[in-house]
Image (cartoon, grey):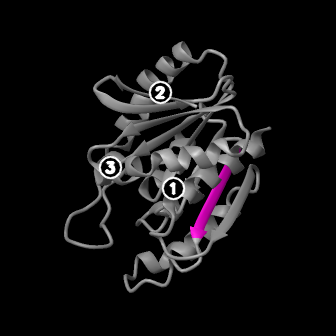
Amino acid sequence: MNKTEIQIENRECYLYSTEKPKFALIQPVDEHDIAVLDNEVSQIENSGMEFILSAFRIHDWNSELTAWNAPQAFGDTSFGDKAGETLRYIKENLIPELNRMFPETEKYILGGYSLAGLFSLWSAYQTDIFSGISAVSPSVWIKGWIPFAESHEIRAEAVYLSLGNHEHKARNAMMKMVRENIIRQSELLKNQKSVLEWNEGNHFQNPDLRTAKGFVRTMEQLL
């Protein structure tokens, strides 16, 4: 497994690649994700898949990964509306550079954990550039998400969803909706190759292992 850290248009990108990558996995990450990224990649590598993982740094998690202003579950601040800029970075900067470096790659999969999972889902409603989406414990409880998903058509061929089976057991009223909302999200994917998988535990357990599993399952759907 080759590992490289590079800058692509002023963003830190962590690249991992096997010898003959077929899939390009793209993941927005913050410092918590970066700390366990080696373990995540090791788990994906154990699947025997040929892939590259490009994990790019997000500096303002709540703003850069949401498409509209909405209240957060905690505190008085609201989510931002910079998701369009982040998607534009992926399409106009990151993917062209990956194409140059790994021209043999055939399919792109966008995925991530929590708000990055929600961003991945949202992106699939905006563009058909991603063959697969891996949305691991996505923040589908965010206000306005289900009406948005019900009124738009997703454009990825395969979608993986997962959630911890205790995530809805929260005191916060918005976060209690996550189980109901992800089941509804799954129902809306009847025209795609889709999986909804339940993990043991709450939102904060084994995000690296869950993310790795999501990417592997998404690649398997696209074989």
Residue 94 point in image, percent of width and height: 45, 25
Compared with residue 74, is residue 135 higher up or lower down, i.e. above or below?
above
Kind of residue indicated by mark 3: Glu
Report the span colored magenta: 158-163
> Which residue is the site of mark 1?
208
Q: Nearer the viewer, mark 2 or mark 3?
A: 3
Q: Is residue 26 magenta?
A: no
Image position of 77 (left or right of 185): left
Mark 1 closeness class: few <14, some 14–19, many ≥20 residues within 10 Å? many
User: Which residue position holds label 3?
Assistant: 31
- Check the image and report above or below for 7 versus 170: above
Q: CA distance from mark 2 to mark 3?
A: 23 Å
Q: Quadrant of the N terminus?
A: top right
| Earlier-in-chain disc, 1 versus 2 | 2
Q: Residues within 10 Å of mark 2 (few under 14, many from 20)?
A: some
**What is the three-letter code of the residue carrying label 2?**
Lys
Could you say whether the residue bearing mark 1 is in a helix, strand or loop?
helix
Q: Count the numbered circles shown.
A: 3
